[in-house]
Amino acid sequence: MLRGSMPEAPCTTDTVASLVLRQISTPLAYWPTGLQSPGEELVNWYDVRLDAAREGAGFLGIAQVVALADRGVTIFDPLSTLVSRHAQIGAGCVLYPTIIIECDEASACVLGTGNTLLPGTRIVATAGGRIRIGADSVIGEGGAQVKANRPDARIEIGDRTRLVGGAGIMGITTIGTGCQVIGAIMAQSVRLEGGQDWTHPDPDQRGAVLKGHGLARGLHLGSGEVVNGAGDFSQAPVERQAAYHPRAARGEQEHPAACPG
């Protein structure tokens, strides 16, 4: 049971530490029964309570998340970062706040080196699903979901991809190297052929792109192709990426903001 008021205490280093922690979470505005003073004892109590909930759901405890830094993983906020104890995270990955990597013991979730997971990213491998992500991809600018939550689900994502703007990846899906899914698109059982990444000067040599919003189911796009959909992607035309980047197609330098898609 939690008391409704804080005891008075001198302003020590421990007091300052507890006050900082109070800014992180509302429950710390109350003292647990039995604690007589602020400081490290309260911090330990708080960590134990949080770790019990995390570990019960299959996630690493707070100290274990922090320890990922020893393997070269950058963590900005361990309190808001949930990482499954069954997931494999490569060196050089950067995990921003509010990301979730969920994987049960019957499934597989492997992230290669140098990937950046931005706020709002959720990666789920459960019920026997398999997710493998290569190296140096950017996932979650504006949110993204990668979900393999059934026994036959297999998601393969190559190197230097971009999954941004609310993209959702599901089913039996292959996102090749350099490919992009841009926008609130549910990409279900699609195959995007790889190529160069979005910074390459020739857009028709870049990996395939889905952009827009809606449902893309069962599509197969080749390198340099793009579908710009609104609703049902099967009704949208397949185009060459050069149609969206005419300056690059003529060998002229594009403005960097024009490169994606």
Image (cartoon, helix red, strand yellow):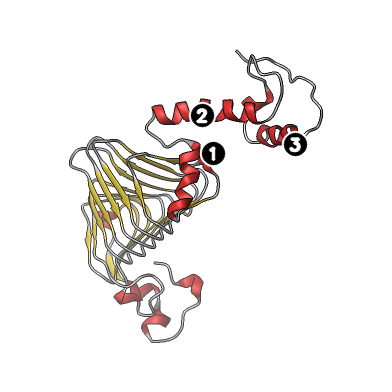
Quarter that holds the N terminus: top right
Residue at mark 2: 50
- The residue located at (27%, 38%) in the rendering is 149
Q: Position of residue 257 (x, y in %)?
A: 50, 70
Residue at mark 3: 13
Residue closer to the observer: 240 or 152 = 152
Looking at numbered disc 2 in the image, what kind of residue is underneath it?
Answer: Leu
- Contact check, label 2 and label 1, Cβ < 8 Å: yes
Q: Earlier in the sequence, mark 3 or mark 2?
A: 3
Secondary structure, mark 2, is helix
Looking at numbered disc 1 in the image, what kind of residue is underneath it?
Answer: Leu
Secondary structure, mark 3, is helix
Q: Earlier in the sequence, mark 1 or mark 3?
A: 3
Looking at numbered disc 3 in the image, what kind of residue is underneath it?
Answer: Thr
Judge left or right: residue 208 versus residue 116.
left
Residue at mark 1: 79
Residue located farthest toward the bottom when viewing the structure as drawn:
251
Quarter that holds the C terminus: bottom left
| 181 versus 128 height, above or below | below
- The residue located at (81%, 32%) in the rendering is 11
Judge left or right: residue 76 versus residue 131.
right
Mark-to-mark CA distance, 3 and 2: 23 Å
Q: Position of residue 68 (x, y in %)?
A: 45, 48
Judge left or right: residue 175 versus residue 118.
left
Secondary structure, mark 1, is helix
Which marked residue is nearer to the observer: mark 1 or mark 3?
A: 3
